[in-house]
Image (tube, rainbow, N blue to C red):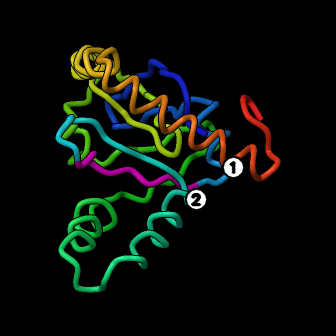
């Protein structure tokens, strides 16, 4: 699972060190996939083979000619770069992705549970401010609490316990 936020740097050759906890979340794989986040945030999004397999299974649930399926395939699958993690935990980001994310010098990695993001630090700060204004809204807290309680009830019914299990 990709959690927390880490600072990093991109060198002149476009290489970045993936934070050790994120490498651990990749399960020892030497491959990572990175693409421009489709939400317009300006971040790059990335994940491992497990995420790509989840996307493959999810896409198989959609009709073959679905415009939604085509959009996801075009903007994530076809646009992703498959990168090899070297022995020191680094990957070389393609120049077009660095340009799209306005990445040079310092960068931020943020965990997104099943995936992670790579940010220009200024964009990340703006994104955090926008998200804080959303997360503190009563309707957000109510929606999250409702979803949390449904999941907790399902887990308890399945004998997996509630909190922290």
The one of 36 and 10 positioned closer to us in this rendering: 36
Q: Residue at x 19, y 31 (%)?
A: 102
- The reply to whether the magenta stretch includes residue 113 is no
Q: Which residues are magenta?
A: 31-38
User: Tag 1, which secondary structure?
Assistant: loop
> Which residue is label 2 attached to?
50
Q: Position of residue 57 (x, y in %)?
A: 49, 72
Q: Residue at x 49, y 39 (%)?
A: 147
Q: Position of residue 59 (x, y in %)?
A: 39, 73
Q: Is residue 63 above or below residue 17?
A: below
> Which residue is label 1 attached to?
27
Q: Is residue 11 above or below residue 35?
A: above
Q: Position of residue 72 (x, y in %)?
A: 27, 64
Quarter of the image with the N terminus is top right
What is the crowding at mark 1: few (fewer than 14 residues within 10 Å), some, or many (at least 20)?
Answer: few
Q: Position of residue 162 (x, y in %)?
A: 73, 34
Q: Residue at x 25, y 39 (%)?
A: 98
Question: Does the residue at mark 2 contact the one at mark 1 (Cβ under 8 Å)?
Answer: yes
User: Tag 2, which secondary structure?
Assistant: helix
- The residue mark sitting in front, 2 or 1, is 2
């Amino acid at each position: 699972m990709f959690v927390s936020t880490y600072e990093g740097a991109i060198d002149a050759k476009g290489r970045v060190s993936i934070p050790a906890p994120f490498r651990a979340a990749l399960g020892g794989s030497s491959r990572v996939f990175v693409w421009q986040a489709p939400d317009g945030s300006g971040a790059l999004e990335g994940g491992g083979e497990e995420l790509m397999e989840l996307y493959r299974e999810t896409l198989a649930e959609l009709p073959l000619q679905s415009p939604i399926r085509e959009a996801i395939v075009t903007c994530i699958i076809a646009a992703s770069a498959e990168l090899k993690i070297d022995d020191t935990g680094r990957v070389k980001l393609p120049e077009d992705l660095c340009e799209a994310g306005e990445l040079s010098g310092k960068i931020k990695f943020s965990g997104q549970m099943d995936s992670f993001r790579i940010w220009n630090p200024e964009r990340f700060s703006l994104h955090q401010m926008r998200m804080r204004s959303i997360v503190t809204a009563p309707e957000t807290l109510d929606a999250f609490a409702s979803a949390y309680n449904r999941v907790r009830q399902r887990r308890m019914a399945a004998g997996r316990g509630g909190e922290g299990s």
